[in-house]
Image (cartoon, helix red, strand yellow):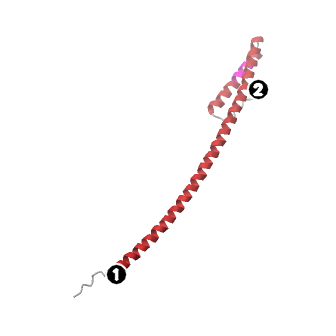
Amino acid sequence: MPETNQLNPKDTARDLKQHLAEALKTVAALRREVAGEIDHLKDSLGKSAQATKTLRDEARVEVRLAGMEAKQSWEKIAQQVGDAERNARHEMSQAAAKALDEAADRMRGFLKTLRDGEKSASPPEGK
């Protein structure tokens, strides 16, 4: 009596070919999907790199401008302090002492601004 569970070689080969064809289709679809994700990732990384470059350039300009503003503020304060010191040497008076105190306050404010990292290092308005 023939066994009913025997494999027919032709059926087995056909089934294997069919499974292989389905597997190859699945692999091709996955490759397309992965390629699309890679393209998306490349595009995203390119945009991020460009945004980072733009921000770096903007920061460089801001730092340069902040440095220029701080230098201008320093020059103004230094002039005021120098004037107050010269006046104090020539005029030993309450007004000269007050001018020196005000100049010192402006200097402290300027230094605090620099230390606090504020963008604008403008001194308080004064003499």
Image quarter for residue 89? top right
Residue designated by label 2 = 126
**Magenta run includes residue 100:** yes
Q: Alpha-carbon distance for marks 1 and 2?
A: 102 Å
Which residue occupies 65% across, 39% down? 60
Which residue occupies 34% across, 78% down? 12
Residue 40 appears in the picture as rendered: yes
Estimate the x, y position of residue 51 in percent, counting from the top left: 62, 49
Circles 1 and 2, Cβ within 8 Å, touching? The answer is no
Tell me the amino acid under the disc marked 1: Lys
For the N terminus, the quadrant is bottom left
Q: Which mark is residue 124?
A: none
**Secondary structure that dominates the magenta span:** helix
Number of residues whose C-alpha sits closer than 10 Å to that of mark 2, classed few (under 14), some (14–19) or many (20 or more): few
Q: Is residue 96 above or below residue 125?
A: above
Residue 102 appears in the picture as rendered: no
Tag 2, which secondary structure? loop
Residue designated by label 1 = 10
Number of residues whose C-alpha sits closer than 10 Å to that of mark 1, classed few (under 14), some (14–19) or many (20 or more): few
**Magenta run includes residue 80:** no
Image quarter for residue 119? top right
Tag 1, which secondary structure? helix
With 73 as the anchor, is 53 left or right in this view?
Answer: left
**Magenta residues (range):** 99-105
> Which-is-in-front pick, marks 1 and 2?
1
Tell me the amino acid under the disc marked 2: Gly
For the C terminus, the quadrant is top right
